[in-house]
Image: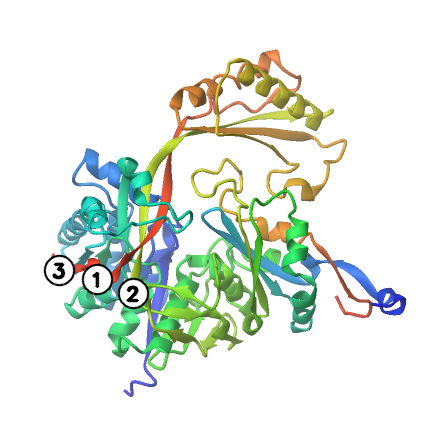
Amino acid sequence: MGAKSRSRTRLVQLRLLAHARSGDKGDTANVGLIALDPAYYPILVKEVTEARVARHFKGMLTGGVQRFELSNLRALNFLLHGALGGGGTLSLKTDAQGKVFSTALLRMEIPVPADLDV
Amino acid sequence: MSAAGRVVRIASGQGFWGDWLEAPVRQVEGGPVDYLMMDYLAEVTMSIMQKQRSRDPSRGYATDFVPLMERILPTVVARGIRVTANAGGVNPQACAEAVVAVARKLGLAGKVRVGIVTGDDILDRLDELTARGHALASMDTGAPLATVRDRVLSANAYLGAAPIVQALVAGANVVITGRVTDTGLTLGPMIHEFGWAADAWDRLAAGTVAGHIIECGAQCSGGNCLVDWDRIPGMDEPGYPIVEAQADGTFAITKHPGTGGRISVPSITEQLVYEMGDPHSYITPDVIADFTSIQLRQAGKNRVQVHGVRGRPATEFLKVSIAYFYGYKAVGTLVYSWPDAYAKARAADRILRARLARLGLQFEEILTEYVGVNATHGRLGGPPHAEVPEVQLRVGVRARERAPVERFSRELAPLILNGPPSVTGFAGGRPKVEEIVAYWPALIAKTEIASRVEVMDA
């Protein structure tokens, strides 16, 4: 990406582009990330990658990150493995069932076109 | 009336054991519904019920269900509504007897037929099954059940919609099950009403998606909804969801007029992705539903139309939910106030950990969280504001043995007098030592599990 195209993007927090809900399956938290506007979905697909999400949660997961695309719902589903301190009844965490992992993902900042209407 | 145009209304009354007690009452009284489904069973619930039954053979089911039925049965009978609920837990028979007794007390003898679905409980068959080569290996770790066999407290296969259909065919107007899938409680009535074949995969998948949308009650109709959450009206009286199903597998999600909450594409989408794994394969005993095929359309105020759902043949296996005794845990909290609230809470944690170490206590884990700082988002929230008014120190420990956890529970209170200043919030007393019942998911061949359906008349 050249200097010119870089200058035409800006960083935006995901909370302005998407809403989300999370839940648990054992020690794995799932976060469904849903575009607030159809125009945002391709940006989410491009920018909110497995690698970016793994970096966002670095030190908070004992396992990896998997991503699935649901273009029909303009949503991405992330599985965050080893996110819940053992999960279920074993976990000592306040958020043992990953109910608010969704909002933790919404803190992430991604580059969007400077002229995108957010 | 042509089958294609006929609509069957299935209302959700409880999203979990402990949900809003008014919801099922409002569902049966607030407008026309044909079925009321209620989900009572979380994974850990079965082991609690097993323990209750071992102490008292007349217990082991969702006891709240009986007084609830006492409230709604007259309306249910008068309006010809049929109820499906997995309230039976590990003792559907006793639950059914209690409901029949209530029906008679209400003068509804001859008007209530309870269907009882059993066959899910395989606790007494575990050794026979493993002896015949079923490892019942953990789906999480791959370890064989033998690893924890002597500590197993309950074991239940997830049954699908088929036995619910059988109970409906037998004329039951209240169907009480043990461990049946949450989605089966909604899909069963659809199969019964529309006569869907066992290999009508797209329709079975559509009914399963409908079941998934309404199985958590108001969580699809405005509850826990992030989009415009502060502008969703009437959340003091949220309308619980109703599926309006048609024979072709299309359906709408709506709620009774005049109720609060909101049914919108965003509210439904949030529920669809809740607890989702691989969206291409939502596996139930009845079908594999493909969530990437679901099409949603806002079809009016508080009305979302769903179509396009695709399904694939079900697997040869049923999921088994096994609960086993794991060990002990305790969680305690103290609140520290301004000034330097966070620094004081951290100092208290250091002191506590030094004392635990000096006592030589062994824990699998000691977890410290600072509520108001990092309990929900870890480091992502950044450091707290220097003038933060208060921070709650929250410390949890887990061990296989009871003794170290018991001792931990006595080490928190002393900090009130012999630790950092400005501490309060110890009203709850000593942290409670809790037994940990852990969850062991496994698979079993369908051919090994035979569901049973009986009916009992009031």
Q: Are marks 1 and 2 in contact (CB under 8 Å)?
A: yes
Residue beneath disc 3 = B455
* Both marks 1 and 3 on one chain: yes
Q: In terms of depth relative to the viewer, which is nearer, B354 or A40?
A: B354
Figure quadrant of the C terminus of chain A: bottom right
The amino acid at mark 2 is Glu
In the structure shown, which secondary structural element does the residue marked by tag 3 occupy? strand
Q: Nearer the viewer, mark 2 or mark 3?
A: 2
Residue B314 screen position, x and y as percent: 33, 69
* Both marks 2 and 3 on one chain: yes
**Sequence-wise, which precedes: disc 1 or disc 3?**
1
Q: Quadrant of residue B217?
A: bottom left
**Sequence-wise, which precedes: disc 2 or disc 3?**
2
**Badge number at residue B447:** 1
Q: CA distance from mark 1 to mark 2?
A: 8 Å
Residue beneath disc 2 = B316
Q: Residue at x 32, y 82 (%)?
A: B6
The amino acid at mark 1 is Thr
Mark 1 crowd level (few <14, some 14–19, many ≥20, 10 Å Cα): few
Q: Is residue B191 above or below residue B318?
A: below
Figure quadrant of the N terminus of chain A: bottom right
In the structure shown, which secondary structural element does the residue marked by tag 2 occupy? loop
Residue A62 screen position, x and y as percent: 56, 44
Q: Chain of mark 3?
A: B
